[in-house]
Amino acid sequence: MNFKRGSLYLMGAWAAALIFGYLYNFWLTHRFSQAVYGDYQVVISILFWLEIVVINGMPYTIQKFLGSETAHSGDILKTAFRLQLLVAASLFLLAFAAAPFIARIFKANSYSFYLRLAFVDILFLGFFHLFTAYQNGVRHFGKQALLIMLYALGKLIVGVVLVFVWGNLNAALAANVAASIIGCLLGVLFLGRFPNAESYPAGPLIRFTMPSLGYLLLLNLLFSIDLWIVNFYLKSAVSGYYGLAGMLARAPYFLFIGVSITMLPTLSVGLSRGDLASVRHMFRQALQFLWLLMAPTGMLVTVFSRDIMAVLFKPEYAPAAPVLAVLVWGMIALSFLFLNTTILNADHQPGLSLLVVGGTVILDVILNMACIPRWGVAAAPLCTVAACTAGLGVSAILVFRRFRVAIPGRSFLKISVTAVIIAGLAWISHIRGPWIFAAIPACLALYTGLLILFGELSRRDLEEIFRDTAAGLPDLPLEDLS
């Protein structure tokens, strides 16, 4: 399966997962006070960051190894499972013991119990991601996408039921654990009958994982640093609406992350064969494809940010609108930073990716700690945009020096101008309120039409995309939903 079709499958899965996630958060904002919802956002962000060790450590590694050593897929998964079990148990025990210390850092002793309840999720979620990573590594992108959607739907249903019954923060945190258990069971079901496997050497997996894990921990800090510093200096209620804005701003990143995820095993194969010409061509396509998707998304979110908050959430969340309008561009910059470092990782340079992302994190911390106490919450999204853009610039220079690949200037200009045109039309149309949810698809349709008119998209391009998509998901019998 080519990376475009795989990207479409995963984008569809992440779109469904985002919708389910937003419905769940919509439910929570109406069931909880803004302060309690702020506590939920902070606790979940701490949990999510720690879980990067089990979500993106061994799972991220096996995607790379399976891409270049498909014949040993069973062996690799067997060894990775054992390593994941050891890491998950160790991380849970350390996190559980450290919960009171973490709570004191955030000046909230009540967080200690909430964190310990949340940390139970560490024991399960990593295995769900290990199973999805396996499907990615063997290029069963359709099966991976279905697994993601079913997990997200299960989390929505369990979360709504538990919060409805108990109506407190404990219920919301317990729902995460229950959903991860469901995800693990689905992951096993998707594997079906697995062939007997021998143990793959653990050394290469560990050696790749360590610098990659540091890179991924730092990369995902960029989702939470601003929220944590806002929570430290300001009140929980501010964290509530800032955390909500951050969750919404990450939508483009997670919606289009399939472009980067499907690139890793595909690029690994090309680089292992020494086929630099195809690698350059594929990466150039990925850059154009990602900007073609990101440019209108960022513009429309910025234009309609106030209406999104007003229509979907309670009035006390209205201050999140200007945060969302700015922060979405930080997440777009982070998406390209991730894409650039993905090719560096595929080229066996995870240490270089670590340095780039580490510098971005340090800059983000310095800017936020210097600006938030002085200018308040309005400074936080600007600091994140500045830091992520700087990291993107450095990573783009490194990739260009190695592969001589960048978005063609003419394509970048056409896409950018077209996105600005539809954003301007959306702004002067004065469409407000619930009508924006009809205006957004109309704007995207106009955007596509203008790109065709400007020669950036051709009928052949569209036919290729939809023909690949129409080829359908692989057969998914119930006994082998993988």
Image (tube, rainbow, N blue to C red):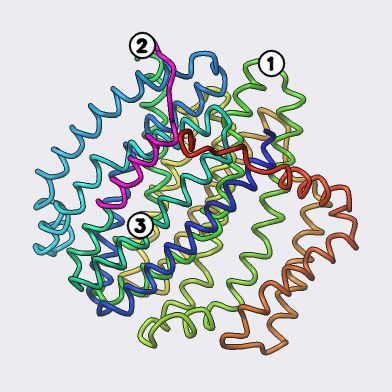
Image location (x, y in percent) of residue 431: 66, 87
Q: Nearer the viewer, residue 146 or 114?
A: 146
Q: Is residue 284 above or below residue 68?
A: below
Is residue 188 in the magenta section? yes
Is residue 468 in the magenta section? no
Q: Nearer the viewer, residue 257 or 328?
A: 257
Image location (x, y in percent) of residue 94: 14, 38
Task: Say which of marks 3 and 1 sits in front.
Answer: 3
Identity of the amino acid at label 2?
Answer: Ser
Q: Which residue is denoted by mark 3 in the rendering?
A: 155
Q: Quadrant of the N terminus?
A: top right
Please, what secondary structure does the residue beneath circle 1 have?
Answer: loop
Q: Determine which quarter of the picture holds residue 397.
A: top right
Is 48 left or right of 61, judged from the image as shown?
left
Q: Nearer the viewer, residue 482 or 214?
A: 482
In this picture, which residue range is highlighted in magenta?
Answer: 177-200
Identity of the amino acid at label 1?
Answer: Gly
Q: Are marks 3 and 1 in contact (CB under 8 Å)?
A: no
- Disc 2 crowd rating (10 Å Cα; few below 14, some 14-19, many 20+) is some
Q: Determine which quarter of the picture holds residue 85.
A: top left
Please, what secondary structure does the residue beneath circle 2 have?
Answer: loop
